Every structure is written in C-alpha cells, then in structure tokens.
C-alpha cells in the first residue's frame, strides 16, 4: 500500500534536509500548471510514488473546478501506475518523454490527447542540457537515503536523475524506505561528461568498471521538499518462455557458436545488451542453458534472466541503469543485494547507453520488434504505422553502435492475422543500415554483407511464417520485374497494402472479397 508517512527521518541523516520533510500533498502543492518536471524512474523501478499521486488528485480537483492543470513529464523510461497511470488518468500530462509502457498513457497518446516525444534514451540528458526542451522547473527524484553530508543514495534505477537534479530549478526528494539500504555502493555516477567542444573520452573500458561515485550530489538550497514513502516498485512477472521464444533463443545461441568458431568473437562472447520484453528475457534463459561462460553485459536493465546468469556463474559482470525484475526475483535480489555489488553497476542512462562506450566494447544488441521488412528495416514502436506501443527506448543507441545488432520477434502477431515480416515497414525506427540479424522462431537471417535483394530473399526464406512466405515471394518477384528502380525493388502502390488490408479486414492475408 502506498504511504506517505509521518516524519521518522531515520533515512534522512542530513539535518537541513530533514527539516524540509513534508507530506506528499504539501510537496505537490509546490507544482504549478505548465511546469516541466524531470522525474526518476526506469522500467518500473525507482520512480517517485507519493507526490505524483498527490499531484494527480490536485489536477483532478482543478479540472472539476474548470481550471486547466497540466504538466510535462520527463523520466528515464517507463514508470508505474502511481506516476504515468495516475497522471494520465487525471488528464494531467501535456507532454511525455522519452519512453512509456503504461496502458492508460498509451491510450491517451493514441487518442491524440497527449503529446509524446519518443527519443533515444542516450539523448535525453543532453537535450535538456542543451536547452532543446526549454526550462526544467522541477526534479522529483526517489532515493534510498540521504547521507549526513546531504549526498543521496539512489534507489533501484538511475536514469536521468543526475541531469534532472543539475538542470532543475527546484528539487523534491522522495525517500523510500522500501528500497533496501544495501543499494548503497551499487551505483556509479560519472560527473566528468562536459558538453562539446569540451567533451573528453569517457574512461570506461570494461562492462562493470567503476569510473564515478556511488552518490548523487544535490545543492541543498535547491531542495524544496523531502517526502517519506514506503512503497514497492512496479514489478511485472515475466511470462515463462514459450516454445516460440525458446526457438528464437536457440537460433541466437547457434549463431553465437558459429561466430565464435569463425573467430569473430571470443568464447566469452562480447558484452550483451538485452532489450525489454518476454522474448529478450527468454534469450537470457537460453544462455543459462548454453555453453558460454565468462559472459559480461553492458545493457540498460537487469532482468530476471541476467540475475539467473549471474547466479549460475555464467555472467561475471553487468552494467545497466535500472533493475526490472519479477516480484519473486526482486525478493531474492533485495535479500542479497550487498553480494551483487561486485558484479552489478548501475549508471546514469547517458552512460549506460552511450554510443562511444557501446562501440568501444563491441556490444551485442538484442531487441524485440513490432515488424521488419524484407530489406531489413525495423519498426520497434508503431502498430499499423500510427499507433504507438511503447517507444524506441535504448534500442537505437545499441543497434546503431553495437558490434552486432540483432532484432527478434515471433513471425506472426495477434493469432497469426499479422505477419511481422512485411513488404515495407509501416514506421521506421532502425534502418537497414543498422540491422545485422533478424530472427524469428522460423530461423535467423544474417544480413551482414548482403545487398538489398539478397537480404530480401534471405529474410523471407529464414524468418517469414510458412503461410506468409509465398505472398512475400510473390511480392518480391513482381517488384523485381516492375519496380521503378531495381536496387531495392518495391511496388509503391502495394508496399503498405498488407497493413491497409489488416485495417480493413482484420487479416494481412488477402481474403476472397478484397
Ligand atoms: N502488429 C501488431 N501488433 C503487434 C505486432 C505487429 N507486427 N507485433 C507485436 N504486436 C503486439 C503483440 O501482439 C502484443 O500485443 P498484446 O499486448 O495485445 O498481446 C504487443 O505488441 C507486445 O508484443 P510481444 O510479442 O508480447 O512482445 P514483447 O513483449 O517482446 O515486446 C516490443 C515487443 C517491440 C513491444 C518491445 O520489445 C519494445 O517495446 N521494443 C522497443 C523498445 C526497446 O527495444 N527497448 C529495448 C532497449 S534496451
């Protein structure tokens, strides 16, 4: 149960900040219509829980009185029902960025009632620092504790917290006693990143190296409120890997073995990045059963599969910006948090997703998709070209800069009515130039070194579902004969026809009457 407790400031050791403890309602009263607020939170962890709820109530009251009250919310990534859900439900969000996965928020965005900017997670901090998004009025940050000298022990995610605190005019801190104190020491916050032209190389050369400090620094004069909470993160259970996900994982493991045999990767592989969702988690489960040892991970989120790999000894070190664990795994990790300090490092997302480091380490990026086209362009975000699902998240940061960029999906969606391999994607997040491998439960297409027509033949052969294969081949054959240009053959009048047909008939496959 969410609680905003009365002052028992055992976790607020700084005298002057302890004096600013107040209720969530009083803190929310400091927020004004039109404010732009940088909030903590990444994949359902470390987001503020009490003040957003109090703000949502305030907004609902204002709306009842006929007064417009909306704020813009910037975070690390997705949060939880007490933040995105409550504020969207109250109609309180004007602009949201950079990533969300909340059903209510998604509904409002797709109804055109809310602005949403879907941007690369590594870009967010610098967008704010460069002033592209205007003034940041407030930072609202969940932490685990406040030290005597006023430094903050971060909670289960770091996201953009450092930037929000630096850039905002005022700061509200939520101190959540549900977060284990043993989180202290797990974070690594790098304060050396300067804006161009003063930017220097980031001195990070292996995945779980520490280059910063475990604490967030906050100028005490900026802190206008401290709110005490005792509330769990949103933790969603993962689906047990189904047969399709296991087959996808199997294809990827076989591919890794081939790459090692070819001498293109060491037997310990290269640092792994694993995206959000059930398939990504299933691949990690697959690695647990696979032959590879001494693995490392340079990624965004620590999921159940990562912890299992760590526990099995197969993974020796992991870097991320947040935890994203099922409730059962979270209990296990929280009990044992101190023992993970050597293996896990949590960093600001501008570092966990930094192109320079991803390229230097040679990260293997593995991310889920909505659809891919026969030439290898990938849509990670939009259903039928216009309806946002979640957002690009960090997939672009890793895909563009990694050593290998793998995208994966079941070959069909929505009980087979949709092929995830289509003639032309209805929205592009990752172009053919950033995609090395596409894999479905049907097979794996290694696109490296292939021309567009060669890629098309291989993607159809390896990845398409049997019932869609002849249709895709028919499209490609006709396009090769009739296309305006023969380099990337397309029939423009037909290329998005599969999507239009689905919107008309609920089926991508042609029906007798259309
Ligand atoms: N057309 C229509 N709907 C589709 C679809 C398609 N081509 N492909 C997937 N979907 C739907 C599924 O049917 C499912 O819908 P449901 O919730 O109604 O059942 C939903 O999208 C999620 O798909 P699922 O197969 O469960 O995949 P997932 O949990 O692996 O998530 C993404 C897939 C693409 C949504 C997810 O990976 C994502 O948000 N990616 C972008 C961000 C990212 O890559 N972040 C990682 C960086 S670290």
Image (cartoon, rainbow, N blue to C red):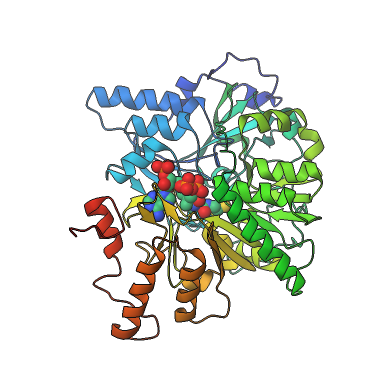
Q: Is residue 274 visible?
A: no
- Could you say where residue 128 lies in the image, as x and y percent from the top left? 49, 53
Q: Is residue 182 visible?
A: yes
- Residue shown at the point (66%, 40%) measured from the top left: 304
- Out of 106 and 445, give the one closest to the viewer: 445
- Residue shown at the point (67%, 33%) measured from the top left: 329
- Up/down of 72 relative to 203, above or below: above
Q: Quadrant of the N terminus?
A: top right
- Could you say where residue 232 lies in the image, as x and y percent from the top left? 59, 26
- Could you say where residue 113 lies in the image, as x and y percent from the top left? 28, 42
- Up/down of 419 relative to 22, above or below: below
Quarter residue 377 falls in = bottom left
Horizontal side, residue 253 vs residue 411: left or right: right
Quarter residue 106 falls in = top left
Horizontal side, residue 204 vs residue 471: left or right: right
- Up/down of 485 relative to 165, above or below: below
- Could you say where residue 42 lies in the image, as x and y percent from the top left? 55, 42
Q: How many marks?
A: 0
Looking at this view, name the residue that lies furthest to the left.
Answer: 513
Horizontal side, residue 314 vs residue 396: left or right: right
- Residue shown at the point (37%, 23%) measured from the top left: 57
- Out of 26 and 286, give the one closest to the viewer: 286
- Out of 281 and 439, give the one closest to the viewer: 439
Q: Quadrant of the C terminus?
A: bottom left
- Out of 237 and 433, give the one closest to the viewer: 237
């Amino acid at each position: 149960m969410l609680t905003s407790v009365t002052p028992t400031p055992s976790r607020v050791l700084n005298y002057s900040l302890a004096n600013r403890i107040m209720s969530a309602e009083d803190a929310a009263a400091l927020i004004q219509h039109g404010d732009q607020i940088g909030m903590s939170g990444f994949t359902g962890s470390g987001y503020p829980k009490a003040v957003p709820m109090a703000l949502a109530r305030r907004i609902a009251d204002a709306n009842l009185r006929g007064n417009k009250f909306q704020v813009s919310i910037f975070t690390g990534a997705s949060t939880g029902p007490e933040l995105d859900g409550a504020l969207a439900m109250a109609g309180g969000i004007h602009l949201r960025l950079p990533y969300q996965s909340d059903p209510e928020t998604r509904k409002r965005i797709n109804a055109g009632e809310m602005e949403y900017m879907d941007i690369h997670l590594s870009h967010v901090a610098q967008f704010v620092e460069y002033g592209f998004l205007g003034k940041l009025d407030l930072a609202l940050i969940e932490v685990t504790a406040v030290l005597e000298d006023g430094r903050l022990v971060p909670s289960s995610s770091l996201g953009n917290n450092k930037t929000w605190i630096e850039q905002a005019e005022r700061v509200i801190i939520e101190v959540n006693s549900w977060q284990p104190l043993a989180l202290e020491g797990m974070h690594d916050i790098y304060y050396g990143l300067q804006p161009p032209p003063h930017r220097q190389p980031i001195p990070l050369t292996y995945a779980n190296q520490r280059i910063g400090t475990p604490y967030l620094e906050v100028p005490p004069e900026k802190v206008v409120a401290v709110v005490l909470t005792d509330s769990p993160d949103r933790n969603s259970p993962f689906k047990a890997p189904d047969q399709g996900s296991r087959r996808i994982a199997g294809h990827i493991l076989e591919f890794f073995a081939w790459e090692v045999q070819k001498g293109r990767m060491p037997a310990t592989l290269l640092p792994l990045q694993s995206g959000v969702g059930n398939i990504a988690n299933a691949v990690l489960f697959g690695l647990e059963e696979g032959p590879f040892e001494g693995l490392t991970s340079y990624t965004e989120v620590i999921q159940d599969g990562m912890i299992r790999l760590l526990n099995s000894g197969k993974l020796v070190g992991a870097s991320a910006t947040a935890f994203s664990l099922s409730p059962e795994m979270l209990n296990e990790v929280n009990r044992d948090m101190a023992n993970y300090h050597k293996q896990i490092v949590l960093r600001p997302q501008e570092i966990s997703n930094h192109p320079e480091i991803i390229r230097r380490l040679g990260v293997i990026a593995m991310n889920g998709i909505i659809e891919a086209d026969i030439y290898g362009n990938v849509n990670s975000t939009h259903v039928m070209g216009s309806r946002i699902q979640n957002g690009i998240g960090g997939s672009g940061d890793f895909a563009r800069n990694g050593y290998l960029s793998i995208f994966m999906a079941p070959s069909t969606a929505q009980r087979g009515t949709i092929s995830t391999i289509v003639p032309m994607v209805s929205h592009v997040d990752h172009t053919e130039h950033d995609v090395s491998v596409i894999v479905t439960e049907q097979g794996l297409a290694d696109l490296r070194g292939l021309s567009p027509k060669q890629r098309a033949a291989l993607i159809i052969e390896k990845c398409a579902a049997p019932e869609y294969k002849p249709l895709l081949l028919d499209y490609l054959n006709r396009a090769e004969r009739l296309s305006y240009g023969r380099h990337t053959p397309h029939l423009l009048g037909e290329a998005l026809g599969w999507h239009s047909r689905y919107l008309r008939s609920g089926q991508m496959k042609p029906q007798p009457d259309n």
